Amino acid sequence: MTKTVCWLAAGLTGALALAGCSSSDPGSNATANAPSAQVGDGVRRDPVVAGRRARVFIMAGFGEKCESLATPNLTITQPPQKGDVSFEPGQETTVNTSATGTCIGQRVKGTGIYYTARPGQTGPDTFAVEAELGGSVTQRTFSVEIVE
């Protein structure tokens, strides 16, 4: 069975295929500075307000028939300096891109990646998350701009 993790980054191998998912939370905010990041890749680019939790991205796995798979195991590999990162499973998202082109526009469930800047913090912050599903691992770095 083909598995896909919704993630717009290079380096997925084996049973995983490259894909990007859009966020379904209009109130979430963030910026991704990855070479493949672009408008429509599902990453929020609005500034993060200090003291408010903001969804940055949704990580999801789906099969060849566009069915949701088990949630990828997520690990913070580079913690942010000015805030905290948390994960919330069971979030719905729309597939924007995939290596095979299948499942684009389909809804799948995944885990939301959230960033909360500590009160009083401003300016840029960066963190990295690693995703593992079916033995394949990839990492993505996120950058956020904090405003009061």
Image (cartoon, rainbow, N blue to C red):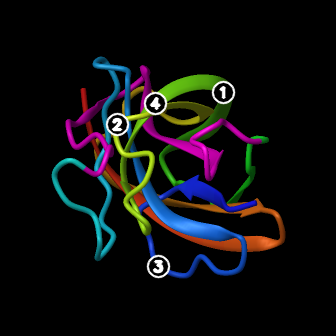
Please state the horizontal and vertical placement of residue 140, each as a whole percent of the image.
Answer: 51, 66
51 sits left or right of 128 in the view: left
Q: Secondary structure at mark 4?
A: strand
- Numbered tag placed on residue 88 in the rendering: 1
- Numbered tag placed on residue 27 in the rendering: none
Q: Secondary structure at mark 2?
A: loop
Closer-to-camera residue (16/87): 16
Q: Is the residue under label 2 in contact with that under label 4 (CB below 8 Å)?
A: no
Q: Is residue 28 visible?
A: yes
Check disc 3 and report the residue beneath it: 10
Residue 119 is drawn in which quadrant? top left
In the image, which residues are magenta? Answer: 41-69
Disc 2/disc 3 C-alpha distance (Å): 21 Å
For the point 60% across and 44% down, which residue is it? 65
Q: Secondary structure at mark 1?
A: strand
Closer-to-camera residue (109/102): 102
Disc 3/disc 4 C-alpha distance (Å): 20 Å
Amino acid carrying label 1: it is: Glu
Earlier sequence position, callout 1 versus callout 3? 3
Q: Is the residue under label 3 in contact with that under label 1 (CB below 8 Å)?
A: no
Earlier sequence position, callout 2 versus callout 3? 3
Check disc 2 and report the residue beneath it: 105
Earlier sequence position, callout 2 versus callout 1? 1
For the point 65% across and 68% down, which residue is it? 16
Q: Nearer the viewer, mark 1 or mark 4?
A: 4
Q: Is the residue under label 4 in contact with that under label 1 (CB below 8 Å)?
A: no
Instruction: Quarter of the image for the C terminus: give it.
Output: top left
Q: Nearer the viewer, mark 1 or mark 3?
A: 3
Q: Nearer the viewer, mark 2 or mark 3?
A: 2
Please state the horizontal and vertical placement of residue 6, each as a whole percent of the image.
Answer: 51, 52
Earlier sequence position, callout 1 versus callout 4? 1
Earlier sequence position, callout 4 versus callout 2? 4
